[in-house]
Image (cartoon, helix red, strand yellow):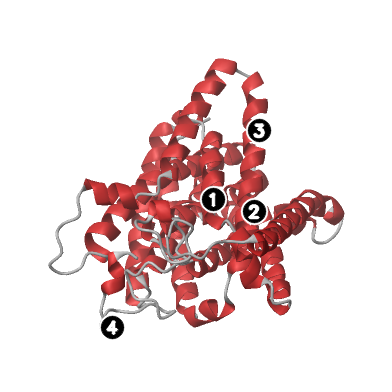
Amino acid sequence: MTTDATRTGDEPRTADATPVGAAPADAVVPASDSGPPTAGDPADPTTPARGGGFWAWTLLGLVIVVGLAALTRYLEQNVPGWAEGTAVEDVGAAIEYPVYAILLGLLGNVAVTLLGWRDRIAAAFRTEFFIKTGLVLLGASINLAVIASAAGPAIAQAILLISGVFLFTWWLAGRFGLDDKLRALLASAVSICGVSAAIAAAGAVRARREQLAYTASLVIIFALPSIFILPWLADVFGLSDAVAGAWIGGNIDTTAAVTAAGALAGEEALQIASIVKVTQNALMGVVAVALTAYFTLRVERRPGAARPGLGELWTRFPKFVLGFIAASVIATWYLDAAGADGKATIAIVNDLRVWFLILAFVSIGLEVRVASLREAGWRPVAVFASATVFNLALALGLASLLFRDFSA
């Protein structure tokens, strides 16, 4: 077990009664990224031998996970067509795969719990593997050459906006008494790129899966209405296409929702929104590094303990972030070398990325324990809502200042 298991009962406690700084067995990092193996991990010598029954149940679990993922993809691809020409056409076109995946995962959770299968098939819920593979592949969609086309204002807005919103959310969550790990997830999600940023932060701070599921749900709930509200407000405020796009890209927390909102605002707004959001996504790795260092050196460091060295930082650092950066660099080079033909290859990589993230979100839904979410209460919602309003105001000011004279 990790050394944090030796903490005393006087430690501050989280909303779900987990000591701040403890690394529970279901933390969103595998043993290889979090120090010594925990009980129940295959690398732990105390783990009982796994017989044929274990593998049979795990195979059944994989069938369930893949089946729900396939149903998610089917709904994602067909619901817009079914909704076309109806009163819910815009909603049907805007709903993203995380919504279907998490909802189906939650429904599956209820079913397998009632059947008494949940704990038996739990080894098939490979959330960390699916998430980290998907995020590495996400790097391939972030073309550094595209960012350079609007490098100045986009990078300036991304740095100022992420810093301002992250620090405000972190401060406000502290005032509401939230656990530091949940503070990190909420601040990363609302300031950078929603679920993907929350996942990266979860790996850096060893957050609980329930905390990640809670944060992902808030991202989705707030992102959907933003698709329609922000383009409407941009029109009401009389914003130029460039300013509207920068405002949309800096606010909405998922890339697909940014695309949907940008399309409603106009072609130029869509282009600027996409560049701004991609620029923010590219800074996800920087935030993961900073969180790793902060939690290692400050939050989880015991009084009187020696200052952790670079080796400890490397042990705690979520290694998949390096894969994310490498994929972005390789994809940028490949597209430059292959030209138009390279886009088909990147499209295949992006399709694989969607599949892995769908598998991850389904697994999150299957793993959620409702009691833990209920115990979190209303405070995270209040923090996320307040941070969203702050993000709206700050992003509007920055977009108006940095993109007022911008022309594509």
Do the numbered discs 1 and 2 sit on residues whose CB atoms are within 8 Å?
no
For marks 1 and 2 on the same chain, the one whose residue lies earlier in the sequence: 1
Q: Which mark is residue 347?
A: 3
Q: What residue lies at 44% left-to-right and 46% top-to-bottom? A: 399
The residues bearing labels 1 and 4 have C-alpha atoms spaced at a distance of 33 Å
Q: What secondary structure is found at the residue carrying circle 2?
A: helix
For marks 3 and 1 on the same chain, the one whose residue lies earlier in the sequence: 1
Q: Which residue is the site of mark 4?
A: 9
Do the numbered discs 3 and 1 sit on residues whose CB atoms are within 8 Å?
no
At label 1, the amino acid type is Phe
Q: What secondary structure is found at the residue carrying circle 1?
A: helix
Rendered position, 295 above or below 352: below
Is residue 401 visible to us here? Answer: no
Q: Position of residue 55 (x, y in %)?
A: 65, 59
Q: What residue lies at 47% left-to-right and 68% top-to-bottom? A: 384
Rendered position, 363 above or below 274: below
Residue nearest the observer in this picture, 333 or 53: 53
For marks 2 and 4 on the same chain, the one whose residue lies earlier in the sequence: 4
Q: Which mark is residue 359?
A: 2
